[in-house]
Amino acid sequence: MNQFGAATLVISAVFLVVATIFVALRLVSRIFVARKVTLSDYVMFVGWALVCALSVVIFNATANGLGVREGVRPYWKVPLAKTEYAFTVLYNPALTAVKSSILIFYLTLSKGQSFFRSGTYLTLGLVIVAGLGLTLVNIFQCRPIAIAIQVPTPPGAYCIDIVALYLSAAPVNIVTDIAIFFLPVPTLWRMRLPKRQKIILLLVFGTGLFVIVISVLRTVFLLHAAIARVTKINPPGVHDLSYYDAYLFLWSAIELDLGIICGCVPSLKPLVARIVPRIIRNPSETSRSSDRGPITRDSTQPPIIASPADATIQVGIKNAQDMTHETRGPVTVHEILTSSAPTSGNQQSSAEGMAGGTTERAPFFDFVTLMYPKSMLKMSNQESLVPIAVMCVIFFLWGFSYGFINVLNAKFQQAAGYELQTSFELHAAYFGAYVFGPILVARQTLKRWGFKATLMTGLSIYSCGTLVFWPAGLLMSLPAFVIGNFIVGLGLSVVETAADLFIALCGPMDYAEMRLNFAQGVQAVGGIVSPILAQQVLFKDISDAEALISVQWTYLGITVVTILVAVAYNFLQLPEASNEELKQLGDRRREDYGTAVRGIRVVWVTLALGVLTQFCSIGGQEDLQTKFRSFLTYNEPNPYPQAFGFLAIGNTLFAVGCFLAAFAQLFLKPRWILLGLYLGVILFSVLSTTMTGYTGITMYLLLFLFNAGIFSITFTICLRGMGEHTKTAASIMTMAISGGAPFPIIQDIVAKSHGIRHAFCVNVALFSFGAIFPLYLNLVPAARKQVDSVKNEDLNHSPREPSQGSVT
């Protein structure tokens, strides 16, 4: 046995022994102390049994050359192939069982917390589906199956690359690890527990952080193995990866054993409370107990309930405090978090009488926040500054992400040798997701849970998408890149729906367009910074598959930062706007919003026209981006600066345009500004198609400036008067961003058939159609009355007459 193989054997054995001890203590705690065995316990036991089997496989592999860097002996090859196959078949079921046990335990904690419960169900479903799918793929990794253990592989047989498969599954593994770590944190943080108990609970659940670290370390060695296979340093007949397999086996075993340990720790509380009660009990409780005389109670002091929903809770707490060890037994972490106090005798009758004859089970905690933020519809401009500043972080991140993805897509095409058409497929996947995300995910989450939950959901989906780029880069797979772009677009569409609406509603409505234009300017700044960082620093030397694999950690970093931002937003006190409050705001100008245009309420006419023109304007905006290089080289074959520099100038003009549009609204009505912007983009679209050289390029760049404020003003105007339908209207308006999917393809078709100059007639047509909307707003009296704001339009003030010049 080689030295590294021996180390693998010893370390795996030590971790297995420790995990076995924790499983044994868990069973003792549940069977003999708590006297209650749950589904979570059974599933964990199954996971432990599978890990034991996997450890036996590792022990066998170390005796047959596992860990040898090169030159595996011939008589080792077949046993190594058998152990590798057995390992790949056992790993995913074991991992699935361990994670499922933890998540099933979470389900018992999430009663009464729909968002926590939904997140747990979603993660559990992902774990089970991914585990089942990967297990089947591993079983049938070769055709026929028996080929998996034959060395060498017979001619005509086919086997998938196991290292590539594991790397492709790594994003799902890391995402679920992070989800399992963070899911209970908000719940535990809000609990009304004594300080010592809260610290203990956070430390108990925080042990999952070690599993995340091990998952990342395991992926490091998978990447080394992948790069070794891509580079083929040694001739194929000599080159083998038993050395990397040893790392894979070792870190996989440690990951599973640590998962078992972390999953068992919360269930040890009854045993610890029985053996060392002073660790868990509150010092103040011990002092009070000694003053009253000896007691036999092992339970901890229940959490303080700040605002109980009914008298049953208070009676339950008193009963829990008065119960003895003989009548109740030790309190587990599960019971502290979820169980209700049993009642008996006259106490139960008293509770029933106080609660109107009901005996509803009441938990030992509440999630009532002592300080609720003020409703965003009641905020003044000064009060809304902090929430808007916080939300601008989201805007910057999503602008940063969009610019980053554009550069990555270009590098992927270069490394894989794909044609230009591929960029349109990736672009269409990203913007096509906007058809589904706002209406299917954002709208439901906004209406049920509010802005904070919607932002967290969108950021979580986005982080999953960034991790998909990991296996996509490794496999150089176009379908994987398309899927990654779609998931990223789906997540950002959910984030954009919530963030745009939040900015529009947070503060007096007469400043809504100004706020959103400013936030869009911040987003544009992110779109300027990220391409420069990606092009000049991160992806500067990316030209082949090996280099593309080496930057995978960039995506892990983005994912981790995104998840940390989502968690941070959970702890922020963000203002909300209920459907009832939105209805009240709409009713205050019922006469303005209730007028009809040809028998249809003006608000619905405005929304319909706004969606159509937004669809076209976004299509025109994306045409500017996708055909920028083609237009530049058509006008100037050797431009200075190069295309990247000119595009940075265009993005900078876009950011400046957003800030100028926001500033202009101090003096001009939004509908006037919108009309001026449309006239500007039409004019410069025509000029860019008729002029050549640097003059034509300048006209083209000015399109970025005038296009900047169109989205924000259109979005905000269309929300006026929607009342309780505001969140639905915002979702529909965000869906219109899907216009970025078809029009670049249409423009490319025109370019191929009629030339690049005629292709930009598509822009002229799109912006000309979009101009119908500002013309409608300025020429139809009912529309003018609807969209013109009034001073102090919020729930704290009575509505006033339209501001200066609002009726023309």
Image (tube, rainbow, N blue to C red):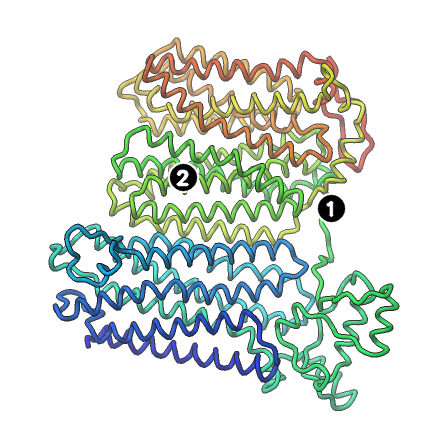
Mark 1, secondary structure of its residue: loop
Image-based side of 571 in relation to 347, left or right: left
Disc 1 crowd, CA 10 A, few/some/many (<14, 14-19, 20+): some
Residue 678 badge: none
Give percent across and percent down for residue 753.
33, 14
As displayed, is residue 121 above or below residue 391? below
Residue sitting at 16 percent across and 62 percent down? Answer: 151
Give percent across and percent down for residue 728.
65, 35
As displayed, is residue 733 above or below residue 633? below
Q: Amino acid at mark 2?
A: Phe
Give percent across and percent down for residue 297.
71, 84
Image-based side of 738 in relation to 744, left or right: right
Residue sitting at 50 percent across and 52 percent down? Answer: 563
Residue labelled with disc 1: 374
Rendered-image quadrant of the C terminus: top right
Residue 237 visible in the snapshot: yes
Q: CA distance from mark 1 to mark 2?
A: 36 Å
Residue sitting at 33 percent across and 32 percent down? Answer: 422
Rendered-image quadrant of the N terminus: bottom left
As displayed, is residue 697 above or below residue 186? above
Closer to the camera in the image, 805 or 413? 413
Q: Amino acid at mark 1?
A: Lys
Mark 2, secondary structure of its residue: helix
Which mark is first along the chain, 2 or 1?
1
Residue labelled with disc 2: 404
Mark 1 touching mark 2, by CB under 8 A?
no
Q: Residue furthest bottom?
A: 294
Residue 806 visible in the snapshot: no
Image-based side of 162 in relation to 709, left or right: left
Answer with the quarter of the image where residue 412 lies.
Answer: top left
Closer to the camera in the image, 419 or 771? 419
